[in-house]
Amino acid sequence: MKRLVTVVTGGSRGIGAAVCRRLAADGHDVVIGYVHDTKAAEAVADEVLQAGARGIAVRADTSVEADVDRLFATAEQRLGPVTGLVNNAGVASPLGRLADTDTADLRRVVDVNLLGTLLCCRRAAQLMTPRRDGVIVNISSVASTLGSPGDYVHYAATKAAVDALTIGLSQELGPDGIRVNSVAPGLIDTDIHAATGDPDRVRRVGPEIPLGRAGRAEEVAAAVAWLMSPDASYTSGAVLRVSGGR
Ligand code: NAP
């Protein structure tokens, strides 16, 4: 029987790690991409193995073309043809107005969130198109429609671009039997908020959300798992908000 082999970028922590655990439980073999935290990535690979699937951790910065090529080559050599991609790797930068944001932070956010997603989508499209089989889920953000003024408009702009990519690529690849969708999380309780210099954000902003709290990474993973599954066989080009109503 055909094995599902799914590459999850940024699978070592937060939403990506929850996606890896959930996909393993759903029968996917999982390639866990990461950059810095080898221990965390290997711990997720162990959990995937314990769930009865195959899991490998591969260090790969998605903003670097050679790393992306190696990520997919390693996946195919060790686990077989890649059938799925979850573009989850993403970064934010210190909160602030655009006027006060460093060029280096602008570049990093664009490089990882947009160029990285494009490079991974391109590699997946090259591999999946001749096989006429594959599913891609891009993790964007509700920032793409909220704009995030005063916090990180550059981050919001990259996420809007990811949703535009989802729409266009779903139309390019639909005739080849490949589905492409976005999941747009709202406020989710992960380490990303500490990296923006606002470790208290989940506690402070959570009560303002219609459902009265921040989301959990597992709640985003459930939406990703549905889009990856045959239950979503007629869903392509969709942007699914997982945001507690915001
Ligand atoms: P997180 O806890 O900070 O985890 C980020 C993950 O991305 C880590 O696994 C990290 O790897 C990896 N990563 C960072 N830069 C990378 C790169 N250049 N190449 C490959 N991997 C890289 O973040 P998160 O909250 O789970 O966010 C996951 C995704 O959801 C992001 O795209 C984010 O923009 C989006 N999102 C998050 C929220 C939220 O509230 N949390 C809301 C909307 C959207 P290392 O462990 O090696 O550093």
Image (cartoon, grey):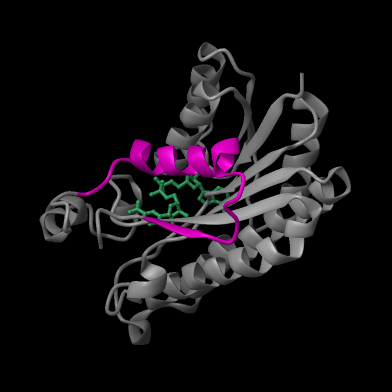
Q: Is residue 227 left or right of residue 149?
A: right
Residue 66 appearing in the image: no
Residue 17 x, y percent position in the rendering: 46, 35
Residue 172 vertical placement versus 227 (above, below): below
Task: Give the x, y percent position of residue 139.
Answer: 49, 54
Identity of the residue drawn at 69% across and 31% down: 5
Give yes or no for residue 228 being in the magenta stretch: yes
Residue lying at the far bottom of the rendered structure: 99
Residue situated in front as seen by the camera: 63 or 22: 22
Q: Is residue 154 visible?
A: yes
Can you say which quadrant of the picture contains the N terminus? top right
Q: Residue furthest right?
A: 130
Residue 200 image point, x, y percent? 17, 53
The residue shown at (52%, 17%) is: 46
Give the residue at the far front of this rendering. Answer: 234
Quarter of the image where the C terminus is located: bottom left
Nearer-the-camera pick, 199 or 4:
4
Q: Is residue 216 above or below residue 138?
A: above
Q: How many numbered discs sit on the rendered protein?
A: 0
Residue drawn 56% across and 15% down?
49
**Viewer-side residue, 121 vs 197:** 121
* Location of residue 60 in the rendering, given as x and y in whole percent from the top left corner: 65, 44
Q: Is residue 118 left or right of residue 107?
A: right
Find the magenta span and give its range. 214-241
> Is residue 82 highlighted in magenta?
no
Measuring 22% from the left and 52% from the top, which residue is drawn there? 199
Depth check: 77 or 36 in front?
77
